[in-house]
Every structure is written in C-alpha cells, then in structure tokens.
Image (cartoon, helix red, strand yellow):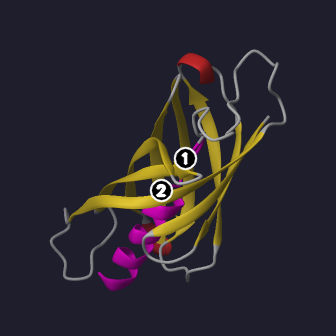
Amino acid sequence: MRMFNTTVGRLVLTACVAGLIAAAIGGVSLARAGGTNHGRTIRVTEVDNGGKFINITHTANGGPGDEFIFSANLRHAGHKVGTLDAMCTLMLHNKLQCQGTFKLLGGTITGTALLPANEPNGSTDHIAITGGTGTFHGASGEVLSTSINNNVSRDVIHLD
C-alpha cells in the first residue's frame, strides 16, 4: 500500500512516539522523573533504521489490522544517543495507531499516537509520552515530530 508505506516511513522518522529523549551526549538535556526536570525540552533527529510491513489482511493495498514494525536511530550533534522501536497498526478511516519505546542512556520512554495514514513530508505529528523506566520513570509530556523526508524527522520532546 503506497500511502501506508510512505506514512510508515515517515513514522519511522517521526518516531512517533514519545520521548526521543536523547542521552547526555553533546549537550542534550535529560529529563528525570520526580519533578526536578519539569518543562525540559529536548531536540533530536530520528533516522530510519529499517522496518517490516505485516499484511494480515492479505489485500494488495493493506487494510485495517495490518501492521508496520520499525526501528530508528536517535541522533544529536552527529552522535547516536538512542534508538526507537515501534509498531503501527492500520485502523479504520485511514488512521494509524502507533506505539513505541525509546531506549536512551538511563532508561526508556514510551509513547503513543493516532495519526493520519497519508500525510505529506513537513507535517508535524503530536505524540503522547505515556511513561518510562529508569531515569525517565513516570515521564509525561508530548513529542512534536516533523518529517524532513521519508527517512529523517526532527523531534522536539516536551516533558511536563
């Protein structure tokens, strides 16, 4: 499915999903649970690292229930600071439900988003931060992820 594959590629970049919180490399701020880092903003670049489309419906263009699983490297100032592993499920009405986990120095951050299945490059997605582990235990907030092309997104992580 052309629209789904383009969006999924974009989602890899977008990384949907929460917390692309980069590690303390090259001046990237780390947010910690417990309230001492409320209001932190972190910027990273997400670079597609691969993915697989799983066609459960066996239709040529995909259908509700089909999934795309992907991974991405998270970079800051030219350095790899983490990874993203995520899965998006094609829903009814041309929507994608995406969930992902960001592995970073000090822990993980989880996120989720309901996104259009066919949006152009340059679109910004809003991804809810739903939790975390380690340094990011209890994380909340939002990721604004803007696609640059089918392989790269710029993410701004706002931690509450």
Q: How many marks?
A: 2
Please state which of residues 76 and 87 is positioned toward the viewer in this rendering.
76
Dominant secondary structure, magenta = helix
Quadrant hosting residue 20: top right
Residue plotted at (82% across, 19% down): 36
- Which mark identifies residue 99? none
User: In the rendered view, does 15 fall on the left or right side of 25?
Assistant: left
Where disc 1 sits, the SS reads: strand
Quadrant hosting residue 84: top left
Which stretch is magenta? 1-20
Q: x, y percentage for residue 114?
A: 56, 58
Badge 1 or badge 2: first in the primary sequence: 2
Verify CB contact (< 8 Å) between mark 1 and mark 2: yes
The answer to if 71 sits in the magenta stretch is no
Residue plotted at (53% across, 36% down): 110
Residue plotted at (58% across, 44% down): 18
Q: x, y percentage for residue 153?
A: 55, 65
- Which mark identifies residue 112? 1
Residue plotted at (33% across, 55% down): 70
Where disc 2 sits, the SS reads: strand
User: In the rendered view, does 124 fall on the left or right side of 68?
Assistant: right
Q: Amino acid at mark 2?
A: Gln
Residue occupied by mark 2: 97
